[in-house]
């Protein structure tokens, strides 16, 4: 059983939703990423989405664009990201790590090599933002061969025929984008999220996570009631931006917010 | 990647792209799920309306009475004589309303947007020609228009920025990345994701997720249809070669498409070689790049070994783009079209030659195609014919040219 599946089954038994923070690998400098990953797990994260920096992050708002730019100033490559995951795995063999990024760095490496190296370094899933299922076959084969889950997005505008196609291609979990817009956008409507998530669940048993627009413990708790995972990204990345150069403050602030979210989510049980 | 099995005489050129929007391995729909519904909606609407007689008649009427089509095919006799080789004919897209070929496409797309009930039009622009052409149609149809433009391009194309504002468009400067055309495209896509319900994204070139490459090609193909008939009328036969500059590649595909089946006609796409193809400062993905994925489609791209998109350089903002339309990529691989590079300096020589010898001031983009004609014509005999797409006029570039030559206006 994959790490992702194991984690979700365990949480299901406990009746909890997963807390999944996102940070961009190598932001604000490569040395911060692995200690930050460990700190996030300690603060209550169940899995980690690790962004692969890309020069042209078309689906991201200004916060994650800047994170990519900061990481790329250090020339953080896919190989470097694998190295970080490998280092993280030296002392954490349980927490799922999902890479999130855009297709072109994978194209440049080659899909087969990507899947092999991802597996070897301890990566559990790949969310390729600009790869919808209709174009995904060439990547899905090597990912499936290596036992790496392909995570796909669903959005408020996704209609039935696409939901069916996406749940057939995806594994691990599905990522429901809670609003129309880029990452870091504002305000999420919990009732609307609930409606969409329960609709998606008619088509699949794969866990459904929700992301975009979750910035505080109250929202995280509300979303955790209607989904299997709460994904938090831009608000954490902003903490890196605001404190770049001060790793201790970054780790403390991010741990603090994740701890609050964890507590609020668990109190709703 | 040339396919020796493929007989170019038997290809059904109008059957491309396939249903999935692929030209060979290129094209497709590589977009975030948040956009896929809008892309499908557009694809369905275009499939339904592209042969609609009422819409086509409206477009034709606008092209005739608003744009001024057909644009002339002009025999540059004096220039041809000086070069001493093939006869050069210029397809005068520079004489269109708004001064470039871009309006052929914006009329089609914005009318389609209106049919789809969209009230807000967004566009990206590099040189500003597509932005002006979009703002123009939006002014005429009373639609809200927002144009994304790289901060660097805003400086080098100031006259076009002012034109867009006069036309009622809002020009939003893009400060991210290299602050040029590719970043304007990123920002327009972000806007589209956010305002997907009421917004139509009017892309200016033959790239982006399917259906854009075929839709923009279809709207631009009027260039080649007219040119072919005009050439036959004036010379009694087909041209021996056709040439156009290639950034994203819309004027080029517009000219080339009609000639693809005429395999006696040689096709040359001219990329911006900037400071030289052997430097890193150019914008020539077909000459020097490799296949990758950006902006919704697979195409030849300028990227580093890690797949990060690299910054490009060209003297002309309209060619300063790291990718190129998927149909061009496919035409290169199957060997139907040749893609070559022309440097900044060579383009400037083409610019001055046409201005001084024929009294026509060309856009710096088009000057790349002219410069290649200057190289190629002398190698051909005087009874041969070349058609060059003069895709735009040079008024917008006067500040750039003056700066380069140390002149203060």
Image (tube, rainbow, N blue to C red):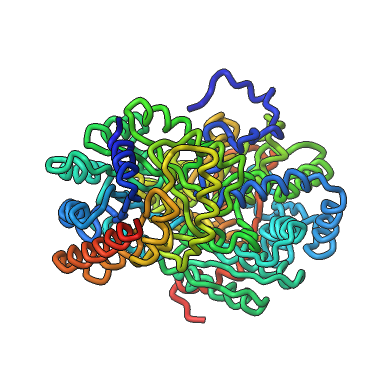
Front-most of residues A81 and B71: A81
Front-most of residues B144 and B38: B38
Residue occupying image coordinates x 52% and y 67% = B149
Residue A228 in percent (x, y) is at: 39, 48
Query: Would residue A42 appear left or right of A173 to someone viewing this image?
Result: left
Front-most of residues A66 and B233: A66
**Residue B288 in view (yes/no):** no
Does A179 sit above or below residue B248?
below
Residue occupying image coordinates x 73% and y 63% = B95
Does B149 sit above or below residue B72?
below
Front-most of residues A17 and B71: A17
Residue B151 in percent (x, y) is at: 45, 70
Does B152 sit above or below residue A157?
below
Res B7 → quadrant: top right
**Residue B156 in view (yes/no):** yes
Residue occupying image coordinates x 59% and y 70% = B396
Does A221 sit above or below residue B243?
below
Residue B302 in percent (x, y) is at: 41, 47
Query: Would residue B216 appear left or right of B321 to someone viewing this image?
Result: right
Residue occupying image coordinates x 82% and y 61% = B62
Res A183 → quadrant: bottom left
Residue A34 in percent (x, y) is at: 17, 51
As drawn, the residue found furthest toward the front would be A269
């Amino acid at each position: 059983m994959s790490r992702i599946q194991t984690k979700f089954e365990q949480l299901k038994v406990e009746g909890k939703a997963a807390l999944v923070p996102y940070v961009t690998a190598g932001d604000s400098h490569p040395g911060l990423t692995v200690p930050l990953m460990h700190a996030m797990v300690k603060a209550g994260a169940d899995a980690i989405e690790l962004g692969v920096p890309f020069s042209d992050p078309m689906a991201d708002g200004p916060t994650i664009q800047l994170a990519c730019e900061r990481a790329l100033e250090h020339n953080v490559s896919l190989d470097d990201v694998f190295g970080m995951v490998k280092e993280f795995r030296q002392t954490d063999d349980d927490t799922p790590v999902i890479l999130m990024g855009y297709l072109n760095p994978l194209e440049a490496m080659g899909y087969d090599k990507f899947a092999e190296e991802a597996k070897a370094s301890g990566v559990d899933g790949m969310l390729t933002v600009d790869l919808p299922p209709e174009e995904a076959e060439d990547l899905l084969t090597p990912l499936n061969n290596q036992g790496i889950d392909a995570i796909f997005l669903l959005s408020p505008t996704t209609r039935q025929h696409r939901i069916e196609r996406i749940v057939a291609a995806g594994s691990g979990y599905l990522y429901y984008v809670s609003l129309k817009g880029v990452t870091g956008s504002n305000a999420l409507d919990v009732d609307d999220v609930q409606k969409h998530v329960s609709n998606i669940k008619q088509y699949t048993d794969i866990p459904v996570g929700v992301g975009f627009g979750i910035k505080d413990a109250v929202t995280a708790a509300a979303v955790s009631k209607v989904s299997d995972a709460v994904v938090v990204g831009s608000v954490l990345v902003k903490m890196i931006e605001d404190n770049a150069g001060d790793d201790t403050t970054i780790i403390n602030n991010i741990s603090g917010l994740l701890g609050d979210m964890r507590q609020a989510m668990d109190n709703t049980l | 990647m040339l396919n020796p099995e493929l007989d170019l005489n038997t290809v059904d050129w109008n059957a491309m792209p396939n249903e999935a929007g692929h030209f060979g391995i290129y094209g497709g729909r590589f977009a975030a799920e948040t956009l896929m519904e809008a892309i499908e909606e557009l694809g369905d609407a275009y499939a339904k309306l592209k042969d609609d007689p009422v819409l086509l008649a409206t477009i034709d009427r606008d092209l005739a009475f608003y744009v001024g089509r057909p644009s002339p095919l002009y025999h540059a006799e004096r220039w041809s004589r000086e070069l001493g080789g093939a006869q050069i004919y210029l397809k005068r897209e520079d004489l269109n309303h708004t001064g470039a070929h871009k309006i052929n496409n914006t009329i089609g797309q914005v009318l389609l947007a209106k049919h789809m009930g969209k009230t807000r039009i967004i566009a990206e622009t590099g040189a500003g020609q597509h932005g002006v052409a979009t703002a123009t149609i939006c002014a005429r149809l009373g639609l809200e228009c927002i144009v994304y433009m790289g901060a660097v391009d805003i400086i080098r194309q100031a006259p076009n920025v002012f034109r867009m504002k006069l036309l009622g468009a809002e020009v939003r400067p893009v400060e991210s990345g290299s602050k040029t055309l590719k970043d304007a495209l990123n920002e327009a896509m972000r806007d589209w994701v956010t305002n997907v319900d009421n917004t139509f994204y009017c892309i200016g070139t033959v790239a982006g997720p399917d259906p854009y490459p075929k839709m923009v090609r279809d709207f631009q193909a009027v260039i080649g249809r007219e040119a072919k008939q005009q050439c036959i009328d004036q010379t009694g036969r087909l041209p021996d070669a056709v040439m156009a500059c290639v950034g994203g590649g819309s004027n080029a595909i517009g000219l080339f498409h009609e000639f693809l089946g005429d395999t006696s006609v040689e096709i040359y796409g001219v990329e911006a070689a900037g400071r030289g193809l052997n430097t890193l400062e150019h914008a020539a993905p077909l000459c020097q790049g490799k296949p990758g994925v950006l902006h919704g489609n697979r195409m030849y791209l300028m990227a580093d070994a890690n797949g990060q998109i690299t910054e490009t350089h060209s003297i002309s903002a309209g060619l300063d783009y790291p990718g190129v339309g998927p149909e061009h990529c496919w035409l290169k691989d199957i060997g139907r079209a040749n893609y070559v590079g022309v440097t900044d300096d060579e383009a400037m020589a083409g610019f001055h030659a046409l201005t001084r010898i024929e009294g026509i001031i060309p856009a710096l983009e088009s000057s790349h195609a002219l410069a290649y004609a200057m190289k190629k014509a002398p190698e051909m005999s005087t009874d041969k014919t070349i058609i060059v797409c003069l895709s735009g006029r040079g008024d917008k570039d006067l500040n750039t040219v003056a700066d380069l030559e140390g002149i203060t206006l």
